[in-house]
Amino acid sequence: MFETVLFPIDRSRQALEIAAKALELARSHSSRLVLLSVVEAERPGMQDHGVVAQLLQQTREQVEQAGVPCEVVERQGKPAFVICDVADEMNVDVIVMGTRGVNLSSDGESTAARVIQLAPCPVLVVP
């Protein structure tokens, strides 16, 4: 049912827990998992390519140990828009993301809420 699962990852404490849910979904549907990191200049910690690369590597290792095909994508921009653009470009079937680690934007809206509004596919939000 889900050939491609998109997992936008951030530096939150819950990121690896949510990765486990994305991995579980991908494994149960024999899906390919795409790990996405969005580098945003205004967000402390996420503009550091070294920190982002380390987080992506940890998650990729977890996914590969489970035997799930994985691709890593790193983009720059506003997270909600980049997530939806990548979902559209890669023709993903579902986006799996969390709510707790995503900062509110300047207008007070969460990234997860914005993705739900704009996404070209279903969005599974993990609390």
Image (tube, grey):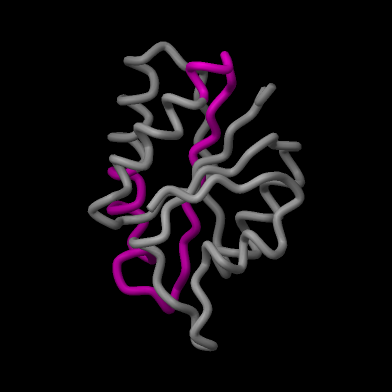
42 drawn magenta: yes
Quarter where residue 22 is shown: top left
Above or below, comparing residue 127 to residue 7 in the picture: below
The correct choice, above or below, for 115 with respect to 6 in the image is below
- Identified at 42% across, 53% down, the residue is 98
Residue at 68% across / 55% down in the picture? 84
Residue 12, x across and y down, in percent: 29, 57
Q: Depth check: give the residue in front, 117 or 58.
A: 117
User: Quadrant where the N terminus lies?
Assistant: top right
Q: Residue furthest left?
A: 13
Instruction: Check if residue 93 falls in the magenta segment.
Output: no
* Residue 46 image offset from top left, x and y in percent: 36, 64
Which range of residues does the magenta coloring cover?
Answer: 26-55
Q: Count how many numbered circles sit on residues in the image.
A: 0
**Relative to 69, does residue 13 appear above or below in the rendering?**
below
- In this view, the residue in front, 55 or 22, is 22
Residue that extends furthest to the front in the rendered view of this protein: 127
Q: Position of residue 93 (x, y in %)?
A: 69, 35
* Residue at the spot 40% in from the left edge and 34% down from the top edge: 21
Residue under the image location 70 percent in, 55 percent down: 119
Q: Quadrant of residue 99?
A: bottom left
Image vertical order of residue 88 relative to residue 103, above or below: above
